[in-house]
Image (cartoon, helix red, strand yellow):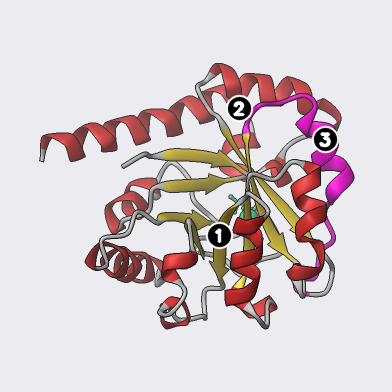
Amino acid sequence: MNYILSPSLLSADFGRMGEQLKILEDCGVNFTHMDVMDGMFVPSISFGMPVLKSLRTQSDFIFDVHLMIEDPERYLVAFKEAGADILTIHAEACRHLDRTLHAIRYLGMKTGVAINPSTPISVLEHILELCDMVLVMSVNPGFGGQSYIPYCTDKIRALRKMVDERGLSVNISVDGGVNLSNVDEVLEAGANVIVAGSAVFAGDIEANTKGFMQKLEDFAAKQTKS
Ligand code: DX5
Ligand code: ZN
């Protein structure tokens, strides 16, 4: 299994984006998590296609785009054109999940389904095969810098069991309140894509990122041994 750090740009300094992406790249990161918020599905408004498009010209990173927007099916082509590689939509915000996941794949992107803390994993039962990634929200979406909700660890564990029992290779991503003190718990539960915003960008970005990369490397080595 690949263990991946996907730093959330929501906590980055937008005035120094190029410089900050370079620091991540030098630490071996090749994913970035981009939080798109519409002020409807979540209270905040963040950024959209023009920002992605501009970053796309500066970076070869895999763009892991987290759409916190109502009726995301309206914008699939626009996000493809803006450079999204993985398009994650919220189960709670999309009325026709099956159709929308097929459309994302048809457009040549990887599919992700995000579920809020209160949404049970049973919502994925019939569409798990259509997901390249499931994003387990471990805070209520809308803001960076919130605390990890402890019951989400059990959800990750149950989801990993569901994925493994079906013999699938769906990535399990965890988003919200993940830091160097709880990342081991999240990995142990079965997540393999770690989203972190404030824990990467607050303070020394290089030291923080190296800390996460070391945790992921150590965990992967432990898995190979056992
Ligand atoms: C929250 C976003 C997250 C956020 C995570 O709605 O989806 O990606 O940026 O930030 P931290 O890691 O600070 O909780
Ligand atoms: Zn996110």
Label 1, residues with CA under 10 Å away: few <14, some 14-19, many ≥20: many
- Quadrant of the rendered image holding ligand 1: bottom right
Residue for point 72% across, 46% down: 10
| Amino acid found under the numbered disc labelled 3 | Phe
Quadrant of the image containing the C terminus: top left
Label 2, residues with CA under 10 Å away: few <14, some 14-19, many ≥20: some
Q: Which residues are magenta?
A: 41-61
* Rendered location of residue 102, percent (x, y): 59, 66
Q: Which residue is mark 2?
A: 205
Vertical comparison of 101 with 82: above or below: below
**Are dots 3 and 2 in contact, CB under 8 Å?**
no
Q: Which residue is mark 3?
A: 14
| Amino acid found under the numbered disc labelled 2 | Ile
Q: Earlier in the sequence, mark 3 or mark 2?
A: 3
Q: Nearer the viewer, residue 182 or 109?
A: 109
Q: Nearer the viewer, mark 2 or mark 1?
A: 1
Helix, strand or loop at mark 3: helix
**Are dots 2 and 1 in contact, CB under 8 Å?**
no
Q: What secondary structure is the stretch in magenta mostly built from?
A: loop
| In the displayed structure image, the side of residue 14 where residue 102 appears, left or right | left
